[in-house]
């Protein structure tokens, strides 16, 4: 059986959501951040050398990167659902969103998080960071115009991957300026599988 090593308030929430959407049987092993440092517990180092989450284990397969996990789970357990047909034009768009989420969109958001901790010392960097956040959120906003999902007419792995970008932008108070993306996230939160994922994974502060 597939095992998800799940850290609270982390990217692994979207993997839990994916498993609930697919109805895939899985074992959930939960880990809690240090309340003071917000760092992952050292026990995760025993699961993967980086000590990060999500990590899945499925027989001899062990995967740590979110996009790779989403891709594997959908190919292995999706039964043709939640991804366009390989070789189609929609598949290439889908694959781009899978990698864009962490490869480009999350970088300025994470820089915002870390530079904000520098207080006044980080002030010179904020205009460029804010510009990049606006650039990426504006791009996402335009791509969602007139669309219910990122690719095609139903939920796909692209939506799963792009959810964390929206959650972090929302937590920084930046999502309201992008109504298409904000409305999309509201729709995702309303899905029964998303609600089950929060119930099983514990209080998810990024989604509260």
Image: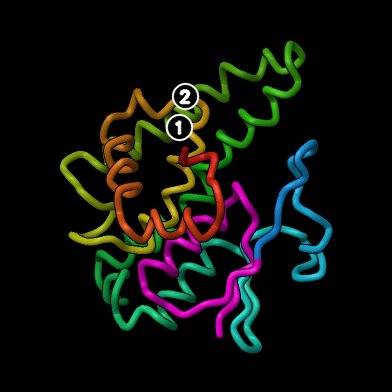
Q: Which residue is rendered at x = 42% and y = 50% of the image?
A: 162
Quadrant of the rendered image containing residue 39: top right
| Extent of the magenta region | 1-29
Q: Which residue is rendered at x = 27% and y = 71% of the image?
A: 84
Task: Pinpoint residue 193: horizontal percent, then vertical percent.
Answer: 36, 61
Residue 142 shown left or right of residue 69 in the figure? left
Task: Pinpoint residue 88: horizontal percent, then vertical percent.
Answer: 25, 72
Q: Which residue is rendered at x = 44% and y = 83% of the image?
A: 76
User: Cα distance, mark 1 to mark 2?
Assistant: 5 Å
Quadrant of the rendered image containing residue 176: top left
Task: Pinpoint residue 2: horizontal percent, then vertical percent.
Answer: 56, 80
Towards the viewer: 108 or 70: 70
Residue highlighted by disc 2: 173
Few, some or many C-alpha atoms within 10 Å of disc 2 (few <14, some 14-19, many ≥20)? few
Q: Regarding mark 1 in the picture, which secondary structure is present there?
A: helix
Name, please, the residue furthest toward the bottom: 59
Towards the viewer: 115 or 48: 48
Residue 35 shown left or right of residue 17 in the figure? right
The reply to whether the C-beta atoms of the residues labelled 1 and 2 are less than 8 Å apart is yes
Task: Pinpoint residue 173: horizontal percent, then vertical percent.
Answer: 47, 24
Residue 207 shown left or right of residue 154 in the figure? right
Rendered image: mark on residue 170: 1
């Amino acid at each position: 059986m597939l095992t998800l090593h799940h850290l609270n308030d982390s990217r692994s929430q979207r993997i839990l959501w994916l498993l609930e959407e697919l109805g895939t049987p899985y074992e959930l092993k939960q880990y809690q951040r240090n309340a003071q440092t917000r760092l992952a517990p050292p026990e995760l180092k025993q699961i993967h050398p980086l000590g990060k989450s999500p990590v899945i284990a499925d027989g001899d397969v062990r995967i740590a990167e979110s996009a790779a996990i989403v891709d594997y789970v959908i190919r292995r357990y999706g039964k043709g659902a939640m991804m366009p047909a390989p070789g189609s034009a929609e598949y290439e768009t889908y694959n781009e969103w899978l990698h864009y989420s962490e490869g480009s969109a999350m970088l300025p958001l994470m820089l915002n998080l870390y530079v904000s901790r520098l207080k006044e010392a980080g002030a010179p960097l904020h205009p460029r960071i804010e510009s990049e956040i606006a650039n990426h959120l504006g791009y996402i906003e335009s791509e969602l115009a007139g669309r219910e999902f990122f690719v095609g007419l139903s939920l796909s792995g692209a939506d799963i991957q792009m959810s964390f970008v929206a959650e972090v932008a929302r937590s920084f108070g930046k999502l309201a300026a992008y109504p298409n993306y904000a409305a999309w996230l509201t729709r995702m939160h309303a899905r029964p599988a998303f609600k089950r994922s929060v119930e099983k994974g514990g209080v998810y502060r990024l989604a509260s």
